[in-house]
DNA sequence: CGTAGACCCTGCGCGC
DNA sequence: TGCGCGCAGGGTCTAC
């Protein structure tokens, strides 16, 4: 479900609605997520502590709490993190919840269980194995065409595969990779060794623009994405190619095509992407 | 080393 | 209507 924009939208609603509240208790009903949930560590690091800030790294949501601990949430493909009254009945696939002093709970639901939920010392975030090898934040100050060009020198893959490689640039998933390449007019199968520095510059600018617009529009809700208050996003109506196989390209009218890369669908316009 | 593919899991929409 | 198939926003591990 979530790529960078969706996690960022979630982060903002968590920041506005949860920061300042205190975690009273942690409930865990299903430990079998992408990694086994360690309920004892979650309780030890979170219970009784106030939430200080909500941050994001790549597609991970980070809730810093008092006394130097951080809750890490990853939504995988189908995860949701939403607020509800503390006494609300457990929903299907609600695997865990944080009980808050305000009388609400922050519930974690994830039907496919590709998500992750763990807590660790805030000071060890940078060296933790989940984060140590992550690449550049595309909406941060260090991202540019040079980032992509430098990575391209070390590899011989297609440009779409490189955009989705989190050791190069984080947060760009299957939807936004297709969208950015379409807007930049670059064919998804093009080898990164045959893209000029100028073209990488335009591609980087396009990635920043697409992700930024998606954040502004509340993210993309294809099926089930929602922010912490349950609000759906609006960017799906702005998608130019994703999930539009056979429909006309909004720029040139040619039929949008789909192909398979790395086991994922890629959507592109065969006429205006070269 | 870099890369492509398999795999984890549940639910949904489609064609028959 | 019911059933089987393919597909789904991610990340990690393995075999080359």
Image: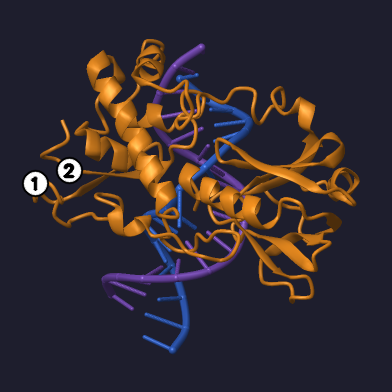
Chain colours: A orange, B purple, C blue
Residue A68 image offset from top left, x and y in percent? 83, 34
Residue A29 pos. (x, y %) = 79, 62
A213 vs A90, nearest the viewer:
A213
Chain bearing tag 1 is A
Mark 1: secondary structure? loop
Dot 2 and dot 1 residues touching (CB under 8 Å): yes
A13 lies left or right of A103:
left
Mark 2 or 1: in front is 1
User: What residue is rendered at 66% in x and 71% in y?
Assistant: A92
Which structural element holds mark 2? loop
Query: Which of the chains bears the disc numbered 2?
Result: A
Report the disc number at residue A252: 1
Left or right: C10 as drawn, with respect to A178? right
Badge 1 local density, few (<14 within 10 Å), some, or many (20+)?
A: few
For the question of whether residue A159 can be seen, the reply is no
Disc 2 marks which residue? A269
Quarter placement of the C terminus of chain A: top left
Instruction: Using the image, tell me which numbered label, if any, was put on residue A217.
Output: none
* Residue A137 appears in view: yes
**How crowded is the residue under tag 2: few (<14 C-alpha within 10 Å), some, or many (20+)?**
many
| Image-based side of B4 in relation to A200, left or right | right
Q: Which residue is drawn at 70% across and 43% down?
A: A53
Which residue corresponds to the image point at 32% horizontal and 29% vertical from the top-left?
A205
Residue A188, position in %: x, y? 27, 33
At which x and y percent is residue A153? Answer: 37, 10
């Amino acid at each position: 479900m979530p790529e960078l924009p969706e996690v960022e939208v979630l982060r903002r609603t968590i920041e506005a609605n949860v920061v300042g509240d205190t975690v009273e208790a942690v409930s865990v009903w299903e430990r079998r997520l992408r990694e086994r949930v360690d309920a004892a560590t979650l309780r030890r690091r979170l219970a009784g502590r106030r939430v200080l800030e909500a941050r994001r790294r790549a597609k991970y949501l980070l809730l810093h709490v008092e006394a130097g601990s951080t809750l890490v949430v990853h939504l995988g493909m189908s995860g949701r993190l939403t607020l509800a009254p503390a006494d609300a009945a457990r929903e299907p696939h609600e695997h865990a919840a944080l009980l808050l002093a305000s009388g609400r709970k922050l519930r974690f639901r994830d039907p496919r269980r590709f998500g992750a939920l763990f807590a660790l010392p805030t000071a060890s975030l940078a060296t933790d194995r989940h984060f140590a090898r992550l690449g550049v934040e595309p909406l941060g100050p260090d991202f540019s065409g040079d980032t992509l060009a430098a990575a391209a020198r070390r590899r011989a893959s297609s440009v779409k595969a490189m955009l989705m490689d989190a050791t190069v640039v984080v947060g760009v998933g299957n939807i936004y990779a297709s969208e950015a390449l379409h807007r930049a007019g670059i064919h998804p199968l093009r080898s990164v060794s045959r893209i000029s520095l100028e073209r990488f510059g335009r591609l980087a600018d396009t990635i920043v623009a697409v992700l930024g617009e998606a954040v502004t529009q509340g993210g993309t809700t294809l099926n089930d994405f929602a922010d912490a208050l349950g609000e759906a996003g609006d960017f799906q109506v702005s998608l130019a190619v994703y999930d539009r196989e056979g429909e006309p390209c909004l720029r040139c009218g040619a039929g949008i095509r789909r192909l398979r890369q790395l086991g994922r669908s890629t959507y592109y316009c065969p006429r205006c992407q070269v």
